[in-house]
Amino acid sequence: MLRARAYHRQKLVLVWSAMRHFAAELQASGWCVDYIEAPSFSAALRQWLGDHAISELHVMEPAERPFQLAIERLHVPGLHWHRSNAFVWSREDFAAWARPYKQLRMETFYREGRRRFGVLMAADGTAPLGGQWNFDRENRKAPPKGLAGPAPLWFEPDATTQAVITKVQALDAERQSAGQPPLPGQLQPFGWAVNRTQALLVLEQFIVNRLDGFGPYQDAMVVGQPTLWHALLSPYLNLGLLHPLEVIRRLEQAGLQQGTPLASLEGLIRQILGWREYTHGLYWWFGADYGGSNHFNATAPLPDWLEQLGSSGMACMDAVLAELAANGYAHHIQRLMVLANYGLLAGLDPQAMTAWFHRMFIDGFDWVMQTNVLGMGLFADGGSLASKPYAASGSYINRMSNYCKGCRYNVKQRSGDQACPFNSLYWDFLDRHHEQLRRNPRMALVIKQLERLEPAALTAIRSTAALHRPSC
Ligand code: SF4
């Protein structure tokens, strides 16, 4: 599976090393483990079934559809699925919640999760702690000059991880000698946690050093500050090294005990009990066809600089890509408002863009990227998930970051050689999809602004935008 696509080098190391550590831990605690290396997941299972007389197979539901299908296709007579412990909501419970609604909104789902699992609730169990469900407004502060977050916890690679690093080097050399491009991203320094003990240490260090400050600047983007107060727990939750409910309970208990501002505590719990559960639930609820959605018929190929993780010429984009190259991570606003926003505005092929996110991000898998990138970032599902496209011009990036100060483009201009590409692309996007967007009441204001543009201004915007859109 991991050889089939050009994954970020550190993602290969993390997944392979975590698997090896898990196998060793199970063996050390008395389990019999068969660790098989095979060309595909199905081939490994077939080999394993051939080696053993299996009459009953107990499997935890995988997060992703292709893995479930691969197991079902083996036609093992005694196949028993078990609920996944990687999510708080089961697929069945999510479906039962979703059925009555025409429009499935995250906020409604999140509030139900808070009530159902008794998280950050007042004593009577019906009202939110602090009298408020949502502190988003307090959590969107623009970065002041010199904003810097506490350093995150990284680890030195142990012997198992070192062996995997050598393996990835060999795989890379093998690919290149077969004429394929190098794998993306830097291989070292590699500092991710690779086992549960380390992942728990990351959680505890986060609680002590970063939880209290998580909220206010969670949307801020600062050059040289790739992590700010972000928790960096998503890779461990998605690999199963940490369980979401244990993390939520621990955060709630520790946060209330140490007097963490409610906006920070709620902001983080919203990410895990809200967004993470919601996107996983929707992945299964929307079904297999969802991944092929393309509402705007966007067909532009990805520019080479996305694959190369740099050299776009845009300071914001190159700052985010450099951080992504360094360790396979960028935070949620960098993903949504820089990377996916560019994909939406430039009309990049949504399937190619989603696959790119999956390959490049340390925490990326289809279940999380389809809904996040295709649905929320690119609006390729036409609004099944979001109520309007998350389209933004350069002024949003300028407000929420310090990127524009070091950019060769001018964030105040929307056409001409010096104009910020996000500006020309933004108005060009509204113009290209005018008919579709004017039917959305949440877009009414910007569509009115578009309609007030002089024809000459619009012509200049179109020709500037054409310089920044990869051609089909
Ligand atoms: Fe990005 Fe535009 Fe700002 Fe440059 S001017 S950093 S392209 S938003």
Image (cartoon, grey):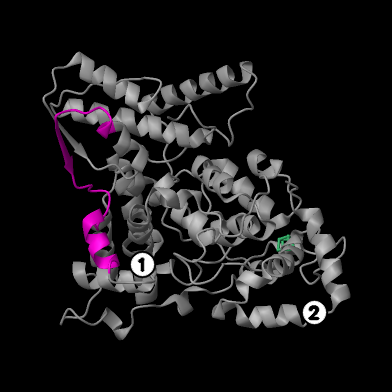
User: Is the C-beta of the residue carrying label 2 under 8 Å from the nearest atom of ligand 1?
Assistant: no
Instruction: Report the residue at 22% width, 73% height from top.
Output: 115
Which range of residues does the magenta coloring cover? 71-99
**Residue type marked 2:** Leu
Q: CA distance from mark 2 to mark 1?
A: 39 Å
Tally the marks: 2
Q: Position of residue 464 (x, y in %)?
A: 83, 61
- Label 2 belongs to which residue? 453
The secondary structure type at the circle numbered 2 is loop
**Ligand 1 is in which quadrant of the figure?**
bottom right
Q: Nearer the viewer, residue 307 or 256?
A: 307
Q: Which mark is residue 270?
A: 1
Q: Position of residue 227 (x, y in %)?
A: 51, 55
Q: Quadrant of the N terminus?
A: top left
Q: Horizontal placement of 160 versus 466: left or right?
A: left
* Residue 174 higher or lower than 337, as above or below: above
